[in-house]
Image (spheres, helix red, strand yellow):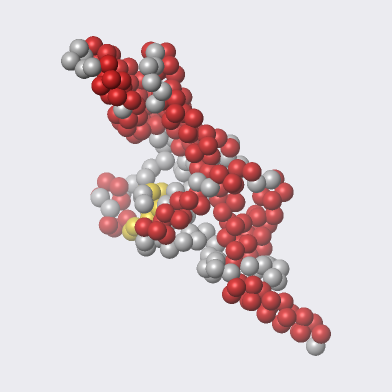
Amino acid sequence: MADTATTASAAAAASAANASSDAPPFQLGKPRFQQTSFYGRFRHFLDIIDPRTLFVTERRLREAVQLLEDYKHGTLRPGVTNEQLWSAQKIKQAILHPDTNEKIFMPFRMSGYIPFGTPIVVGLLLPNQTLASTVFWQWLNQSHNACVNYANRNATKPSPVSKFIQGYLGAVISAVSIAVGLNVLVQKANKFTPATRLLIQRFVPFPAVGPAGDGADASGPAHAHPGATPDRHVHAGEIETSQLEPEIAQATSSRTVVYNKGL
């Protein structure tokens, strides 16, 4: 009788804790926020790029992983709230690769994209750049993008390293060529005043990084990942292969595939 009363009390306490929280009911491997609205997808992206997860300790990571394992196997201790489960999943997804289960190097995590990527963006927009500085910042930007893409790649289907290197070199060459070429053209344009020339040069990085972005995704992850979990490091959708183009549908035996999409 005492054991029954204790169990009932713990269950009641857990239910009250979950009810008092604003967190929705936890779903393993699913987004916390509704993906049917722009606001829900926006909140989801804020969770993905939250830089606070960069400061999670090794002990906290182990606790988060263990909490999710307990939930998965039905051995969750009484009193655990939905908020704690969502927080644990957020930590695990921010630090560990979903396929290899290995830690992602901090500068290449999605949560590290803003703190590590912002200085590069500032460097790209510096005024009065020399040829050397233009080449350096474009190279650094494409290198960072390529490493982020590779670190967060779909590892269920390994791609040859040569494909990664080929895409990376293509992105760097494309970005550097466009940036240097446009800067030279602007400097030789005698019709522009110095102020106009400086203003136009500020926008040179944008057309330079745009075309190179296709080559920067050099890790070999397709936009459709057969058999992947719909909620990976990026927001994803799921579609039946019967609705795809014939050449894409023939490339997989899976009934559905997962694809990346924006806000």
**Is 94 on the left-hand or right-hand side of 133?**
right
Residue farthest right in this picture:
2
User: Who is closer to the viewer here, 158 or 65?
Assistant: 65
What residue is shown at x 56% (from left), y 47% (from top)? 94
What residue is shown at x 46% (from left), y 55% (from top)? 44
Give the position of the N terminus as an image quadrant: bottom right
Residue 139 against residue 18 in the figure, above or below: above
On the question of residue 101 being in view, the answer is: no
What residue is shown at x 63% (from left), y 62% (from top)? 84
Quadrant of res 139:
top left
Number of numbered discs overlaid on the protein picture: 0
Quadrant of res 77:
bottom right
Residue 190 against residue 80 in the figure, above or below: above
**Is 11 on the left-hand or right-hand side of 166?**
right
Residue farthest bottom in this picture:
1
**Is 158 on the left-hand or right-hand side of 8?**
left
User: Who is closer to the viewer here, 34 or 170?
Assistant: 34
Residue 119 against residue 249 in the figure, above or below: above
Residue 52: image location, x then y, percent: 59, 46
Residue 231: image location, x then y, percent: 46, 55
On the question of residue 43 being in view, the answer is: yes
Residue 107 against residue 254 in the figure, above or below: above
Residue 226: image location, x then y, percent: 41, 51
Quadrant of res 191:
top left
User: Who is closer to the viewer here, 75 or 193?
Assistant: 193
What residue is shown at x 66% (from left), y 60% (from top)? 67
